[in-house]
Structure formats: structure tokens, C-alpha cells
Image (tube, rainbow, N blue to C red):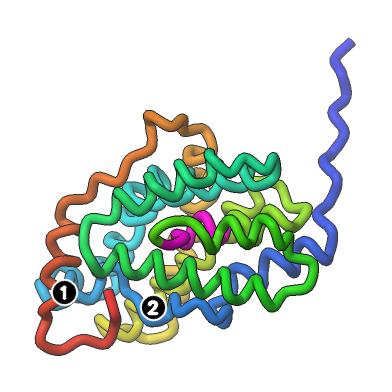
Amino acid sequence: MPRVRRPAAPTSAATLLALMWLASPALPVGGFSYSEGLEAAVEAGLVHNEASAQAWLLDQLLLGLGRGELAVVAQAIAAWRRRDAPRVRELNDWLLSTRESAELRLQTEQMGRSLGAWLQQRPGTDAAALARLLALPPAPSYPVAFALAAAGTSASVREAVLACAFGWAENMVQAAIKAVPLGQSAGQRMLGALVEAIPETVDAALALRDGERMAFMPMLAVLSARHETQYSRLFRS
């Protein structure tokens, strides 16, 4: 007789709200001030309307976040929960080493430090774990800092990574609205396309092993480097 599978326990309201808080663009980590090369793509004429902006962000989700940052978030949550400091540092070192331009490196370091500062103000934060985060040399990366924040909730790893991916999507859509520029309705359509792609991307990221992570996006690296000296710009990356 086949075994009847019980439905998973629903996520508690407190956990759901904690994830929504972490994913919110209002979190004071500075995510709104970065375009991650999108502004340079607009300057180069590669992104010029809703369709091209949507294609750019979907590619970045699938080829960038899905193969690198989201996998690091998932693995770092597990490492924080088992108090594996060497593993946390290994993941942070890998993430920083894959930032291919000064701007992308500064972004993840600045957002990591800012999230660490926010965690210092949050009651219930594991003080020992936070001290290890802030001591990571030369700085904590944002995915590793996000992982610590998520590890302090009762959320599953998948739920936490979904929240991280959605927070990125919302920030990037807002960047596209300002940089292309686009209207709010176009932004919502783009966000809808990203939301549709996020679950499968997250599941793929969760399945990656160390040797399967990658951050190979040469055109993004070139555009990000060009953005450093771009004459007029709205964003820091």
C-alpha cells in the first residue's frame, strides 16, 4: 500500500514576515543604489526597452545568481546553522574572488557590512555568529550576510533563498525602470516574468555542489568595468 505523504507544516507568520523583511528594498543595505551593470548595458545600447531589459534580467538570474550567489546563500545558511566557521569563510572567499570588477566587489562588500550593521540592532541575533561575520576578511559578502540573517529564522533553506532571489528581482526591476527608463506597468510585467523563473532557478541552485558553482559572465564584467568611468550615471554599479 503506498505511503500517504503528509503536507509540510505551514510557515509560521513570524517566519514569513522575517523573510519578507529581509527581501524588502526598504532594508537599509543600499541595494537600490546598484544596477549591477544594467546601467552600462543601457549606455551601450544593449538594453533599450522593456523586452531587452526583461531578457537581460532573466539572463542575469539564470546565468549569474542561479549558478553562483543563490547557491552560496543556501550553502552558507547550512554552515551558519551548524556553526561551521571555516566553511563560512570558504564560501565568502569564493564569492569575493568571483566579483570581476571593482564595482561588483565593492557592492557585495558594502551591502554585506550594512546588513551586518543592521543585524547588530536586531534583538535575538547570535552575537558569536555576528562577530564571525563582521570579522571575515576583507569584508563579509552580501550573500553570506543574508545567509546569517536567514539562518536565525525557522525558514527552510529553500524559502530563504526564494526570498533572497525576490529581493534581488525587485531591486533590479526598479533599477531598470529608472535607467532605461520604463513605466511602472512595464516594471510589473518584468517582475512577473522573474517571479515565474525564480522557483526553478532556486531549485537548480540548491542542487549545485562546490565544483559546479560558477560566475562566468564576461560581457557583464566588461560592462561593469566600463561603468566605472561612465560619464553620467545614476547607480554605483
Q: Is 76 on the left or on the right of 8, as rendered?
A: left
Whether the magenta-drawn stretch holds residue 142 is answered as: yes
Circle 2 sits on which residue?
186
Crowd tier of the residue under label 2, counting other residues whose Cα lies within 10 Å: few below 14, some 14–19, many 20 or above: some
How far across and down, in percent of the image, does residue 163 sit?
Answer: 60, 60
Whether the magenta-drawn stretch holds residue 175 is answered as: no
Q: CA distance from mark 2 to mark 1?
A: 25 Å
Q: Is 150 on the left or on the right of 230, as rendered?
A: right
How far across and down, in percent of the image, does residue 38 sit?
Answer: 25, 71
The answer to whether marks 2 and 1 mark residues whose Cβ atoms lie closer than 8 Å is no
Q: Quadrant of the N terminus?
A: top right
- What residue appears at the point 73 percent right and 65 percent down from the top-left corner? 125
- What residue appears at the point 39 percent right and 47 percent down from the top-left corner? 93
- What residue appears at the point 52 percent right and 67 percent down from the top-left corner? 167
Circle 1 sits on which residue?
227
Q: Quadrant of the C terminus?
A: bottom left
Q: Secondary structure at mark 2?
A: helix
